[in-house]
Amino acid sequence: MTYQHQWQDGSPMAWSPGKVVCVGRNYADHARELNNPVPAEPLLFIKPASALVPLAEPIELPRERGDCHIETEMSLLIGSPLSRAGEDEALEAIAGVGIGFDLTLRELQSKLKQKGHPWELAKAFDGSCPLSVFVRPEGLDWGSVQLQLIRNGQLQQNGNSAAMITPVASLLSYISQHFSLQPGDVVLTGTPAGVGPLSVGDQLQVKLDDRLEVTTRAR
Ligand code: ZN
C-alpha cells in the first residue's frame, strides 16, 4: 500500500511524505538497556520515504532476518522549510505530532555496529517506519508528552519527553544545521526503554498523552 500522511480528523494533507530523520539514544534509560554509551551530541540517521507504511495497518515482519525490535517514538511532521534554524523557528515548523515505530533488525544492527558499518540495512528497509495519523500540536507542552506502548495487554514502553537527552526544540535545531528539513519530512524523537522483539500475532496499542491512540498488530 502506498503511504500518505494523514490528519486524524480526515482533513486533506498538503504534503507528500519525505525523509524521516531519526535520533538514536535520546532517552538515557534506553541507551543503558542496550549497553550503549549516551552520546555527547545527537546520534542521527535517516530512513527514506520508501520505509513508510501506515501504522494502523497490520505490520509485516521481515522474515528470516533475525529479531525485529519495536521502538515506539513521538513523530513530528514538518510543515515549513527548516535550515540552520534556531529553536523558536524550529518549534513553529512543527505542523503535526503522532507516533512512529522505528523498526530495527537488532541482530543485523549489532553485526553492522561491530564492523563499524552504517545502520541502514537494519533500520531503513521497506516497511521499517510505520507512522500513525497526525494531530495538530496546539497547546502541547513539548517537555511533558507521555508515550506508551501496550503489547498484548502489557505496558511495555512508558516514557515522557521530559526524559529526553536532547529536547524537541534543540533536536530540531540541531538536525537543521546538518540536513534541511522540508514540508512533509518527519522527525522521530527517540525511544524510551522497553524495546524488544516483535512476534507474529502481537497486538499493539500506542498512546500519546490523551491526544492520540492507535491499535495495530504484527503479522
Ligand atoms: Zn529509534
Image (tube, rainbow, N blue to C red):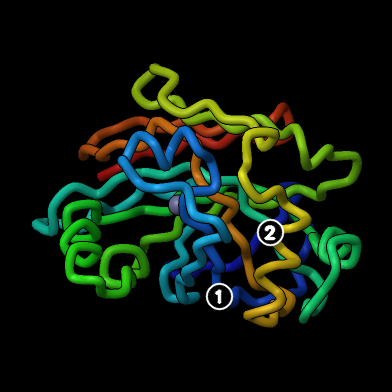
Image height of 23 relative to 202, above or below? below
Under tag 2, what secondary structure? helix
Q: Whole-Å distance between the Cαs marked 2 and 1?
A: 16 Å
Q: Is mark 2 within 8 Å of ligand 1?
A: no
Image height of 12 relative to 50, above or below? above
User: Residue 187 at what x, y percent from top left?
Assistant: 62, 62
- Mark seen at residue 171: 2
> Which residue bears the numbered disc 1?
19
Image height of 67 relative to 18, above or below? above
Extreme residue toward the top, this view? 154
- Mark seen at residue 115: none
Tell me what residue is drawn at x 21 percent, y 37 percent.
Answer: 199
Q: Earlier in the sequence, mark 2 or mark 1?
A: 1
Q: Quadrant of residue 160?
A: top right
Tell me what residue is drawn at x 25 percent, y 49 percent.
Answer: 68
- What residue type is disc 2 on? Leu
Screen quadrant of the C terminus: top left
Tell me what residue is drawn at x 54 percent, y 48 percent.
Answer: 26
